[in-house]
Image (tube, rainbow, N blue to C red):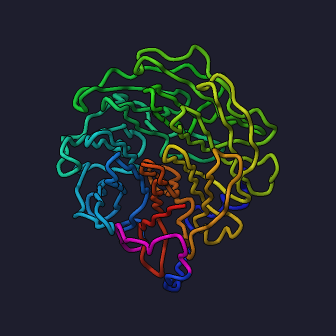
Amino acid sequence: MKVSFVARFVALALITLGAVSQAQMANFTTPIEIASGPVSERGLVLDPGIAVDTDGTVYVVYADLKDNKDVWLRTLSGTPLAAGAPVNVSNTPKISIQPEVAVSGGRVCVAWQEGDPGSLEISVACSDDGGKTFGAGVNVSKSPSVDSGVITLGDGVWDGNLDIAMDKNKNIYVVWADDRDLRFSKSSDGKTFSDPITLPQGSSDVRYPHAEVGPDNTLYISYNEPGEQASDILVLKSTDGGNTFSKDPVFATTNRGFSDASEMALDANNTLYVVNDDTTNNPDNADINLSVSADQGATFQDKGSIAKDGAFPSIATDGKNLFVAFWDIVNEKTLPTGFVYSTDGGKTFTRKDIPDSGDAYGFLELDTGINISDAEVAASPAQGGKSGTAYIVWARAAGREGKILLTTFTP
């Protein structure tokens, strides 16, 4: 899968890109710089993640390879958006990478991989003051003999196999892959976490787990079962706050292609949308595929491709509109950020890629494994008949400087 651009592992193109004009940006706002650093293994900023609270406050996390290699958070609010000072979330001498962030009612929780190569653990830290201060990171994986969040596929070792979600009661759910197992832990206060359990899964390895909570507090977990020729996306669910899960996962994809890198979103009617990249109709690259469940994950309808030549999608909804960001892999040398949106419940999509959003880092071979800094999208809720706002964050190299940027889009 995606063989044509996987070879790009460490090749960061040191090209100078032109400035973005207001006319070029069209519906997108002028990008806000979240973080920057030199394009090097000792200074790069990477792995952006994003979450939006119901009041429209935006939280962006990222890893910074400078100095202590920590995970940082910036909070953005106001009209126009203004970013607060960076907050050190991990604050540890160990390597901290691949952060994910979730928010509910002002509680902000961040999960990341921490430790030394070969013995990474999953850590979580939470803030109950809107991201101003964080408690000490909690080791939730508790597996010193296993590289948590890391999987082996083919000849490569891949990091970033973790996610975090929160429900409307501020309960916290963490899922990750321990090479062959799908692991899960939860917390009600962000300070103490349940002992990790192994979730039901198919007969294969797992990678890229994703967690999402619906309006009715149902928890869904999607993941990829990679195979040699074909691969599918499977979904588990819990209706009791992660105490129990469905006995068997449900296939969200059953096509003949390689389906990978899934994410989910749920609208106000609890309709479940799953996006992933897929090679069924595009074996040389991949397309962005959509599957939809109108019965809370019991069955899925394959809607097919919603964007040509894309990989590693992220999806969000404001309750009625859908927003999907992804790598545009037509030009594998720059990997700009692709973007599509739907205003009719996923029946049709309009493509509107973010102008001048490459050069993405692509696949970086770090000491911890192959690292992917993909684009991420989150959305504020629609209110009073007005659409919400999509917030897109991505990493790029501009000249000899790496940057994490954020733009907004309103249909």
Q: Say if 22 sits above or below 119 in the image.
A: below
Task: State the image coordinates of residue 342 (x, y, percent, origin top left).
Answer: 63, 52
The reply, left or right, for residue 163 in relation to residue 339 is: left
Q: Say if 376 sits above or below 188 in the image.
A: below
The residue at the point 22 percent across, 43 percent down is 127
Q: Which residues are magenta?
A: 24-39
Q: Foreground: 368 or 267?
A: 267
Can see residue 181?
Answer: yes
Q: Which of the 4 image quarters holds residue 137? A: top left
Q: Say if 180 sits above or below 100 in the image.
A: above
The residue at the point 55 percent across, 16 percent down is 246
Task: State the image coordinates of residue 407 (x, y, percent, origin top left).
Answer: 45, 66
Q: Which of the 4 image quarters holds residue 234? A: top right
Q: How many marks?
A: 0
Task: State the image coordinates of residue 409 (x, y, percent, origin top left).
Answer: 50, 63
Q: Is residue 28 magenta?
A: yes
Q: Foreground: 166 or 312?
A: 166
Can see residue 144?
Answer: no
Q: Is residue 394 magenta?
A: no
Residue farthest along the front direction in this orientation: 384
The residue at the point 53 percent across, 52 percent down is 370
Give the quadrant of the C terminus: bottom right
The residue at the point 72 percent across, 55 percent down is 3
Q: Foreground: 411 or 189?
A: 411
